[in-house]
Amino acid sequence: METVVSGIRPTGELHLGNYFGAVKNFIQMQETERCFFFIADYHSLTTHPTPENLHQNVKRVLINYLAAGLDPEKATLYIQSDVPEVTELYLLLNMNAYLGELMRVTSFKEKARKQPNNVNAGLLTYPVLMAADIIIHKAAKVPVGKDQEQHLEMTRTFANRFNRMYKVDYFPEPQAYNFGQELIKIPGLDGSGKMGKSEGEGNAIFLSDPPEVIRKKVMRAVTDTGPTQPNQPKSEPVQNLFTLLSVLSSPDTLAYFEEQYNKCTIRYGDLKKQLAEDIIQINAPMREKMLQLEKDEIYLRKVVTTGAEKARESAQKTVREVREIIGFKSF
Ligand code: TYM
């Protein structure tokens, strides 16, 4: 049995990118592995949420996780800030994380460009906190989407550096993981880039979106004027829609629209209608469960309390051993 760790920042509702990039793997992995899945609320402080927003967003991710099928009986499900041991390991790892390497991280450079008035130290050391999240449970596998690949490389760097520095074979090398295939990137609906919450209105479809909203967002997705020659290469916006079909719809549906495209008889409106209905099918049971969970404060409290206890037990053991390795000795 392998140890698995992953988390999601609470910035609102989860979208299809989060689901297919991460959560769907969580659900499969919880059946056979020792799993820790958390809500990365410390990480979300880099963008300065208000106290009300922070709490609301944590609650929404918890409800989304449970509605998607995470089972607190099988996996340890917790809120990052309920496990303060993470911050101690983060501090210790920070001593061996270098400014140069942190400044070269793509996500840091992107964030610094996007929020030039808030280039805080937490943004710079974001990969260190993420490494602490992972190695605090000595994880081997980390189910994430493609955008987290570089962060996982940093995690391996910090874990290996610790082992080398103290001449121990303590932390394993965690690998980014996607069940049975390559890491994936779910595209957004605006014709470029990935599906993401901060990419602008209408780009992302949330697991909580009702059918009419899904239809509206998908019908507005960017396309082009259509192919004019057989087997013409696809433009980026159209390729994105086909990528969504390949993940969300049946192989027959994908094959049908591929053929229509290659014969120049495709009607993007038909493709979108089909795509929207397939998304609605996936979302419907999750949405229904969300509506139930929203009312069940007692259950939610029980889930996070039990999760915190289990996660702390594992984290405390690691921090105790790390302190010993570093040389903190009691008198
Ligand atoms: P976050 O909150 O941005 O995203 C959560 C997960 O969803 C995946 N994801 C996607 N996958 C495919 N296509 C997309 N369009 C897409 N958008 C998001 C992300 O790859 C991720 O797996 N730093 C992390 C949170 C984190 C973490 C960790 C993850 C903190 N500590 C430790 C793993 C282990 C983040 O910001 O993900």
Image: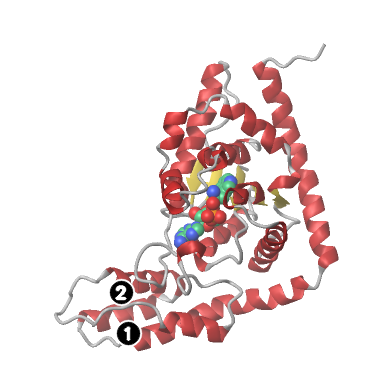
How far across and down, in percent of the image, does residue 20 sit?
A: 50, 63
Q: Residue at x 55, y 80 (%)?
A: 281
Residue 123: image tag: none
Does label 1 or label 2 sit earlier along the sequence? 2
The image shows residue 102, relative to residue 67, as above or below, that is above
Contact (CB < 8 A) between labels 1 and 2? yes
Regarding mark 1 in the picture, which secondary structure is present there?
helix
Q: Nearer the viewer, residue 148 or 257?
A: 148
Residue at image mark 1:
268
Which residue is situated farthest in the left direction here? Answer: 229
Which residue is situated farthest in the top direction here? Answer: 331
Q: In the rendered image, is residue 275 in sight?
A: no
Q: Residue at x 42, y 68 (%)?
A: 188
- Label 1 and label 2: CA atoms lie apart by 9 Å
Q: Would you identify the image quadrant in which residue 103 lies?
A: top left
Q: How is the image coloured?
A: secondary structure
Regarding mark 2 in the picture, which secondary structure is present there?
helix
- Does residue 200 appear left or right of residue 12 in this picture? left
Q: Residue at x 20, y 80 (%)?
A: 227
Residue at image mark 2:
238
At label 1, the amino acid type is: Tyr
Q: Residues within 10 Å of mark 1 (few under 14, many from 20)?
A: many
Q: Residue at x 63, y 51 (%)?
A: 32
At label 2, the amino acid type is: Val
The image shows residue 161, relative to residue 78, as above or below, that is above
